[in-house]
Image (cartoon, rainbow, N blue to C red):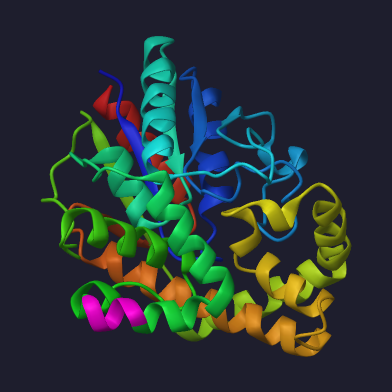
Amino acid sequence: MLPILVLNGPTASGKSSLAVEVAVTLMGRGHPAEVVNTDSMLVYRGMDIGTAKPTSAERRGVPHHLVDIMDVTQTASVADFQVLARATIEACRARGVLPIVVGGSALYMRAILDHFEFPGTDAAVRARWEAELDRVGSEAMHAVLAERAPATAAEILPGNGRRIVRALEVLELTGGHTPNLPAWTYALEGVVAVGLELDRAVMDRRIAERVDQMWADGLVEEVRALERAGLREGVTASRAIGYRQVLQFLDGELSEEEAREAIVRATRRFARKQLGWFRRDARVTWYPAGQPGLAETLADDLVGRR
């Protein structure tokens, strides 16, 4: 059974470029490898700048799966992503291709890799909470969740309206919502989990620089174009970090500089939260981000496991 390389780490740690470098190294040795994206925002066509989606040149000919597969008006759920990603990983292995799983939050990674089942859903209940989210905003909704399920609220950022809505939906349907994820047990065989460490000050600086570059590359223009394509109707896409703040700028709720700063703050909070989750997983082997020769080291390890 071919191993599965999984790259974890905070925003701006270089996961995407390392994934490509490992794939190129493996292919150079006669071992086919392809990238499986698990970032829920990279699935959207047209959401390129704000998601730091690897360009065609940056992919260096390495096939990337689960990128640009949905319109911004569609909703991407973690349950759906679990099915898609597992099927893609299985298909890669069936073709003799080593899958390199990269990107994504800890929740998405665990849903794909671990024994992980989802509570049921009810479209009417979900729609009612989503309407309330639109009416009062995510922070007010977070306060509602904190009152009803404090432990759950403590695990969700106040700006993550989608997860807040889901928690409230499950709470209403089941009468309870546990913040505890399932045991750390892989559902897939041969997982090799790697994490990239990044000094917090360096991470904060890289995030700020990345947002500046996004602005220079035309993030506002990208959001305007996506708005014409129905971005505001997209439950998931319109609330993504970067896109939500630019929409607020376009609506006059924030100045341009306030929107930029809001994106930086939200990205830093997200990166810290995710790093905290990844750190809880004792199965992850950590390396310094940007370590010289890391791609070759990982490739050697993977070839030895074939």
Q: Where residue 59 appears, x then y in whole percent?
A: 67, 38
- Judge whether 162 appears above or below 46 on screen: below
Q: Which residues are magenta?
A: 144-148
**Which residue sits at x=36%, y=69%?**
275
Q: Where residue 56 appears, x then y in whole percent?
A: 75, 38
Predominant SS of the magenta segment: helix
Foreground residue among 30 and 101:
101
The count of marks equals 0
Quarter in which the N terminus is drawn: top left
Figure quadrant of residue 187: top left
Q: Is residue 112 left or right of residue 69?
A: left
**Which residue sits at x=51%, y=53%?**
15
- Judge whether 243 appears above or below 153 on screen: above
Q: Is residue 147 magenta?
A: yes
* Residue 290 visible to the viewer: no
Q: Where residue 248 appears, x then y in whole percent?
A: 74, 77
**Which residue sits at x=87%, y=54%?**
225
Q: Is residue 247 left or right of residue 90?
A: right
